[in-house]
Image (cartoon, coloured by chain):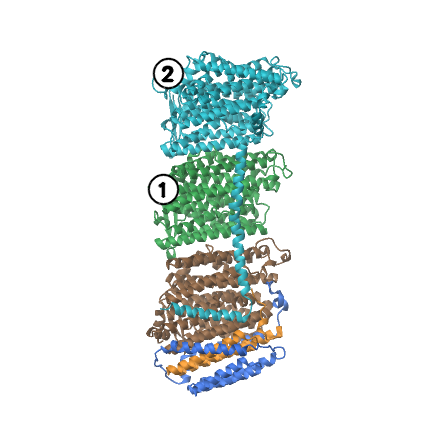
Chain colours: A green, B blue, C orange, D cyan, E brown
Amino acid sequence: MTNNIQTIILLTIFVPIVGSLTIPLAGLISKRARSFWSVLIALATTASSMLLLPFALKGGELAFRKTLALGLDFIVVADALSVFMAVASSFIGALIVVYSLGYIAHEENQSEYYFIVLLFIGAMMGLVFSANLIFMYLFWEIAAIACWRLIGFYRVRDHVLKADKAFLLTFFGAVAMLLGFILIYAQTGTFDLTAMRGTAIPGIAVLLILLGMFSKSATVPLHTWLPDAGVAPTTVTALLHAAVLVKIGVYAYARIFSYTFQLPEGWQQAIPILVVFSSLLAAAAAAVENDLKRILAYSTVSQIGYIFLGFAVMNPLGVSGSLLFILMHGLAKAGLFLCAGIIIHATHERDIRKLGGLIKTMPWTAVAFIFCSFSVIGIPPFGGFFSKFMVIVATVQSGRIWVAAAALFAAVLTMYYLFKVFSAVFMGEAAPASGHREGTRSMVFVVVTLAVLSLLAGLFVAYPTKLANIAAGEIVRWIQ
Amino acid sequence: MHLFLLIGLLAFSILAILSRDLLKSAISLAVASIFLALVFFRMNAVYAGVFELSVVAGLITVLFITAITLTRGDGDVAESRGHRIVFPLFFLALAVVDLLVMKKLLGQIPAIQGSESGTFSQVLWNQRTFDLVGQVGAISAGVLAVLALFRRDDRHGNAASDGGDTGGRHE
Amino acid sequence: MNNLWILNMGFVALLVGIGLYCLLTMKNTVKLLIGIEIIAKGVTLALVASGYARENLMVAQSLAITVIVVDVAVIATALALIININRHTKSLDVRKLTKLKG
Amino acid sequence: MNPQNLLIPVLLPLLLALFSFLLPRGIKRLREIVSVLGAALFVYVAVSFFGGKETMLTLPWLGHGIDFELRLYQFSQFILLAVSGFTFLIVLYSTVRMAGNPRLREYYGYLFLTAAMSAGAVLANNFVPLVFFWEGLLITLYALITIGGKGSHRTAVKAFLIGGFCDFCMILGIAILWSQTGTLRLSDISVVPQGLTAVSFYLMMIGAVAKAGSMPFHTWIPDAAVDAPVAVMAFIPAALEKLLGIYMLSRICLDIFRLEVNSTPALVLMTLGALTIVLAVFMALIQKDLKKLLSFHAVSQVGYMMLGIGTAIPIGIAGGIFHMINHAMYKSGLFLAAGSVEQQAGTTELKKLGGLARSMPLTALGFIVCAAAISGIWPLNGFVSKEMVFHGSYETGYTIFTIAAWLGAILTFASFLKAGHSVFFGPRGLETAAVKESRSPIYIPILVLAALCVLFGVYNALPLRLFIQPILAGHAAPGEHLDFTAHALAVFNPIALISMGCLLIAFALHVFGFRRGGNKAYLASEPIHRLPVLRTLYDLAEARVFDLYEQGIKGLQAFSRFLFRFVDRPIDAFFEKFVVQIGRAATGALKAVHNGLYANYLAWAIGGLVIIVWAIGALTR
Amino acid sequence: MLFLFIIVPLVLAGLLPLLGKVSKRLLPDLLASAAMLFLLVLAVFSARPLIADGGIIQQAFWFGAPLNIRLLLDGFSLFMLFTISLVSFAVTIYSINYMEHYGAKANYYALLLAMIAGMNGLVLSGDLFTLYVFLEVAAIASYALVAFGRGHDELEASFKYLMLSAVASAFVLLSIAVIFGVTGGVSFGAVAQGLKTLNIKYVVGFCSGLFLAGFGLKAALVPFHSWLPDAHPSAPAPISAMLSGVLIKVSGVYAMTRIFLGVFGLTPALTTVLTVMGIVSIFVGALAALGQNDIKRMLAYSSISQIGYVVLAFGIGTPLGILAGLFHLFNHALFKSLLFLNAGAVEQSTGTRSLDKMGGLAKVMPLTAVTSAIGSLAIAGVPPLNGFWSKLLIIIALVQAKMHVLAALAVLGSVITLWYYLVLQHQAFFGKLNEAWQGVKEAPFWMSAATVLLALLCIVTGLAFPFVIQSWLQPAADVLGKGVGVALNFIGF
């Protein structure tokens, strides 16, 4: 049994990584072969991560290691938290790969694209299952490389500069985090997370590690790369960032701060305030912006604040809320970005002031968009409601009523700007730039699927919650 | 006597530097070498003295003079006259510092007995063989360097690395 | 013995010092090379003086000879360079050699 | 009863909704038939539930105490019945009124979805399912308003944003309450609002009264009256939202919090109610459009209910709740009547209408009865419930509230005199020459509702004993007198007499205005409109200055712009500009010192040597 | 056997000019590459078993007759030999195509071989003075190689290099003279023994200062770095790779480390000075690189910065610090050579080194672009590439040594490193293809082969870092970790 699980975990990590290396080879055969090979790898990854679900649902926890030099051991841990993240991100990743089939079909450098995307998924899997700080950092940076190449995918000078900015900012955060890890190492003598549960760590290490998480998860004050990155690349890439990449920081927070270490009291108080400010600021920025993708990117920043908030308040409800939030936000934000992709594909216009009346020509997209918006805002019966509700309630339970109120105010802003977008893009008079046809069948299919999934996730919320609750139980176990 | 020789060495070195004529400089340098050789003789370092005389005072001076002749006519660079004032000041300061520091620094070193054995050639051939290999290397490297620098131009597409095309660096 | 060594070393320092002075202030490339030579003389003197002081003269002499040989190679290369540079710039002024900067 | 059955009121409309969504657009007749039959079935279910034992259903849901809990008891039975009844009537009405609408499929779908959500919200016994259904109603509301077509989207968004804001307040209130009480089960909670729980009370109150459409969260209703289909107006703001909002408010005030008479929360609630009554009715008075006029009344009447419940005195509470059901009936009736007029005459502008009583007698009858009921004319239901509210508020000792309520009564009647007069009496409007009576599915609901108004008024014992008394039974002090039927229609007591007097004043006002306006009924309210201070205020109100939504959005925009310009952009500039500038400056300086001069380089080296030697010397001990 | 490391390149260097008369290209190419391959194989397979139980002293034989040449081989020198051989092999095969347009290949190879002979000799010597002599051999060859193109830039750079380097040699020699005068010997063992018995901290400190200045100049530590940004870019690309990749490390860092750690013993004062110099170099190099428009000049400044890391790590003096320094030294040899070779490929294809004029070359030179991206990421310390591990170890070592501020600065330095490498990447390879380079072709086979080899090594070293550490670095670090003890063991050979 244990061996089986080990094999599955290793497969989940290395199928996409090794698979990504074969993409250029497959590209030599034919475009079609390459595309389908990519999809196959992505689906295999998803399937293999899903194979771990029964194990995780039973509350299983498994850690094993491969000893390498200097205490830098490769340690893998599978528990509800990692499996939840793995399934959520690999699933959305696979969906993105499928969507890319159509979206990317006419671009250059497709081999590179698939290679990078799969590498990204692999890095994500590796990160999720790693229980060694250094290996977490390693996969973290692989993801950063992937992200860098993807933002600059179109090779336009401006895009490349944005890519550099994103890479540099996240790299800055990441190395700061690394320094934090090393400070911890100097204190404990190990990088092994499983061996360090409940250790109290110094505040400076927390600060450094937070820099990393905040930069990756695009949280104020290290968030500005995400809106910029959202503008530059293909929509799919923007989505990859918004739906998957930014979750890395959040996951690391859960794994490192919630699951493993004991934060100093001051930070326990400060982090919720920081993240809720981030949420508020980003929501405000989204309300001001007029660029469709920038709005969505800022929206991501804003929602990430909630996820952090749930983890930061450190009670079971908040943690499961945040975990659910990761899933729900992934689905809904994916839907929004892909809708934006369809719109931009059809109209070549990103400024919402120049769009309008698209509901007549793109009814399906419009409906999918509003569904996903509902989920992001947190309106029942969509999935986003539960996660947001749980996070906020958990915040109040931890005694931070003002923080919760601020978070709710951010939710009001969310509501405002998403409706602003919807009104501007789909309603009103058809602007000169509009009047285009609905997106291709496959694209519409994917967005509608995501919208419906957002709804179903809300209606059948009990199932993901079960896993999230197990994970939350594990995470906060040592507090009690 | 020893001091006199050292002062002579120093004086001609200074002359070599301050002289406004390159040829005079080179010849002063040669004279300084002779003084150094004499110092070596005074210290019983016969072989070093001979080498100093022949190679430095001889060969290197020849090299210098050759080079000066080859570049003369278009290579007369006027040195600043300020040296007459600056150099004595500098020299004075240097000498003072030297006087103060050297004794202090080296004075504390206890005299130890050397473990000298054998003749010069034994030492050179048996103990410092590796250095000889190095000498061979240095000479061949020098020869190769000169060969490379004075080689006949047989490159294809000569302009590639010459002049302004090597990169748009900012001036 | 020690005193002689210190005296010698004092002159070594002076030689190296004026050599550096030459390198720092002179403009003529050949003159600079002469500065190098003076430093080399100082160093050779230091080696021999050290050997003399420590009754290790034979080794010191072999070291000095090696230094001299190496020095010849360096000087030869340097002069070759100077001649080559002179072909390009028609000058021996080291201050004209400032194309590479920044 | 099998607890599982509690799911039926939720699932049945849901299935109907799904059916409507899935049925292809073209099939109309089948959709209508199934909808009507389904709605009838829904009514049957509600009826069969009525009077049954208290039943609880608990299904595990999210853990952490968040379970899917439903509870059927007297109050919810009653509200459920009302919900189903209105659903049926509206569906019936819609078969004709909405017949030509291109988005019929969605319309029925959302209608039943609304019913399902409402049923769920009514039955929920755990705050999370409650919020789930409660907030879910926003979506259907949004969708139903957009069915109104061009221009309706703005209103829909407005409704959504206001509702969303208030629901978020409620969520915060629930969260605080949960953290204070440790449970989410409604039936387990009973606290006195003080300190944090008082905050929670206010927040939840905002959620409840906003749903009911109280000031200042009402502003979408008049807009929706113009934009949304009239059936939707009759269904949601007029009926369902009142039912749910006041249901919730009563539960908050009765069960969840033990509201003490004249405690601060009670006074806040009453003040809000009184303000709502007066301000909204002032707005209603001057409206020139029938639907808009009705919609302001829909707001105003909420004030009575809030006032009644806010008294925390049994008769007041009973009056508030009774007023809720009454209001739902007559306001629905009025809206439906307005719809009927709109369909036949093509407009609801008072100016263009007139003398329709002859061509549309049944509609006119329904309208008049309902208008009389809302104005509190003896012996209709409105009279009964309003009197109870007057009594209740009077008993609190704060007569000011009673006076406000009376002022509301005056203007209500005045405005309905104006409305009824302009629409159904007087000369025919020029453009409405050939108007016929509507078809039966339209006037039947109106008449049914009018009949119910009469029934509940004349035979008020039925609702009071059957519905309201059991609700209060559990909460009143033992031995307290809960049978209000005795003096329900009593006319000869000071309060009732004053009320009657108010009606007379209203009549006088109308006549005065009618004469002043050159015998044009729609100008009857002009004298009040033109009063010096009021006029300015009215102008400002027309300009939406008092619209908290408009101001709030402006505030949000300003807030956002502030944060964006002064926090977000500077942060970005820090990375984009400042850091880059520093890098440039450093690299520029370094480039400048690497000037290519050999002497310079050598000087560095010698300086470095000196420093190193000095440093080593200094550091060597 | 070890003598082969010196004599093979030296003899070949002597022969090649003669052979060059016979065959202008084929024979020099073949012989030089074969020689390098031979040395590489020798280092990997033959020399390694020799140090199984620590270092050895081997006597050289000349046709069966014993010579009085004693070569010192321990983990550290073997490690350096391996690095030298590896990079020089890559450089040699790269030169096959690259040096075509310079002509005089035989002469070029001869100089290259002389330089390698010098470096090998330096590494294998167990004696301060011999070390100096071979330092000069390598240096003289490198002067000529820098000036090999004989353009104005090359000559100017070479001249400044020579003049500064000569001063550096003088410093070194002066220090040796003093040491010789103090201890009466010049071999490592004798010096270590002599210094151990004498208590003359200030003289040793003074000598350390001179050595530090001298070798610091060779290693291009700030403020002795000024020649490097001129010399390295001006040299032909393979030579730039050789200089930046190996020469500054062998003649600067290796010599310095050998003497300070292995002969003098690291004092706290030296630790402070070395670490501070390291940090200053990191920042000056990185910040100066940031604004460069000449691709090779940027790389040259980057070398200064990276050498700073190496010296910083050695300066810590803890076993982990030494290991990290060695690892970074090796890694830097790999990726800096790679980057210089890439820059050479670009320069050859486009005829320019100006980043402004490039753009989008990834499209026409995919291999070069990919390998260059790998090199850039590796040098910036992005995992899982090799640079990451070494920087990680450096930072761990700093933190363990309680040098938290230095650790933070080192980390910041790596951010700046990434910054300018991203500038390089997006200027040169990323972005839209410049119209002018539409017809540009990928680098020829051997050039690509060399870069791909190095890029693969970057990846492999990163992935298989435990293996690299255990098999190559640990023995070397052990040697240095033991400090003076090792030198004392070799006394009186």
| Location of residue D497 with respect to A193 vertically, above or below | above
Badge 2, how many Cα within 10 Å: few under 14, some, many 20+?
few
Q: Nearer the viewer, residue C99 or D70?
A: C99
Q: Chain of mark 2?
A: D
Specify whether residue A208 is in view: yes
At label 2, the amino acid type is: His
Q: Nearer the viewer, residue D249 or D39?
A: D249
Helix, strand or loop under label 1: helix
Residue highlighted by disc 1: A476
Q: Nearer the viewer, residue D615 or E153?
A: D615
Specify whether residue A13 is in view: no
Q: Which mark is residue D481?
A: 2
Q: Which mark is residue A216?
A: none
Whether callout 1 and callout 2 share a subunit is answered no
| Residue D381, percent from left and from top | 48, 15
| Location of residue A21 with respect to D338 vertically, above or below | below
Q: Chain of mark 1?
A: A
Q: CA distance from mark 1 to mark 2?
A: 53 Å
| Residue D358, percent from left and from top | 61, 12
Give the mark toward the camera: 1 or 2: 2
| Location of residue D136 with respect to A237 vertically, above or below | above
| Residue B40, percent from left and from top | 44, 85
| Location of residue D2 with respect to A367 vertically, above or below | above
The quarter of the picture where residue D233 lies is: top right
Image mark count: 2
The quarter of the picture where residue A274 lies is: top left
| Residue D421, percent from left and from top | 59, 16
- Residue at figure coordinates x 57%, y 13% from the top left: D362
Helix, strand or loop under label 2: loop
